[in-house]
Image (spheres, rainbow, N blue to C red):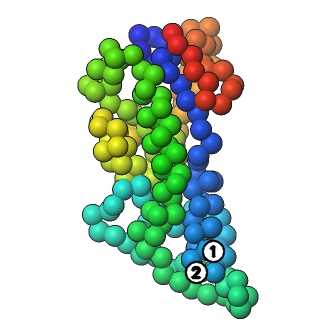
Amino acid sequence: MSMGGVVVSRSLRVAGDELDQSIVQYIRNKYNVLIGERVAEQVKWNIGSAFPLPVEKTVEVRGRNLITGLPESIEVSSVEVRDALSQSVLVIVATIKDALDEVPPEIVADLMDIGICLSGGGALLLGLADRLSEELNLRVWVAEDPLTCVVRGAGIVLEDFPTYSHYLVGLERGSTRHS
């Protein structure tokens, strides 16, 4: 957004559920252990990251061994979870890079000064801001209370729709609107 309008917009379907599913698949493929999505989500929040951690962590994961059918407990590292999440993180990075390619040069200068703000639940993935900052060569930070800032912003738009409706982007995924 710049000068009261949307410059470039992108939307992608990589979200928390897809990250959880990546962890389920990774553990299934590597350890032949089936875990539930709730367990995968806990793993993501406890040791998941998009960038190397200062001190790598491990967590015990319990599931069902797919060969024996019996319960099994395994230890999974943050390095493994980062590997499991890597494809989804690459999609996020590529989508942002694609959008930045369309940003006019004068707005790129503003981005270099201001940076990029992450919002929503995905912004809470450890190291995502650091990873994006390194990949994009821009300052990237997480919004205050990222879980609720999106819905609070939607509430502001709905309270005064005529004033803010021009900020809304079409329903088509990946649509771009220049203002």
Residue 167 visible at all? yes
* As drawn, 69 above or below 45: below
Occupied quadrant, residue 19: bottom right
Residue 126 visible at all? no
Occupied quadrant, residue 64: bottom right
- What residue is shown at x 52% (from left), y 13% (from top)? 178
- The x and y percentages for residue 115 are 32, 30
Amino acid type of disc 2?
Tyr
* As drawn, 40 above or below 17: below
Q: How many labels does the image show?
A: 2
Seen in the image, is 113 located left or right of residue 24?
left
- The x and y percentages for residue 75 are 48, 81
- What residue is shown at x 42% (from left), y 58% (from top)? 49
CB within 8 Å, label 1 to label 2: yes
- What residue is shown at x 58% (from left), y 80% (from top)? 31
Residue for badge 1: 28
Q: In the depicted view, which residue is nearer to us: 52 or 59?
A: 52
Residue for badge 2: 31
* As drawn, 49 above or below 150: below
Q: Mark 1, residues whose alpha carbon is within 10 Å: few (<14), some, or many (≥20)? A: some
Q: Mark 2, residues whose alpha carbon is within 10 Å: few (<14), some, or many (≥20)? A: few
Amino acid type of disc 1?
Arg
Could you tell me which secondary element the residue under label 1 belongs to? helix
Location of the N terminus by quadrant is top left
Seen in the image, is 177 located left or right of residue 68?
left
- The x and y percentages for residue 158 are 63, 19
Could you tell me which secondary element the residue under label 2 belongs to? helix
- What residue is shown at x 60% (from left), y 19% (from top)? 168
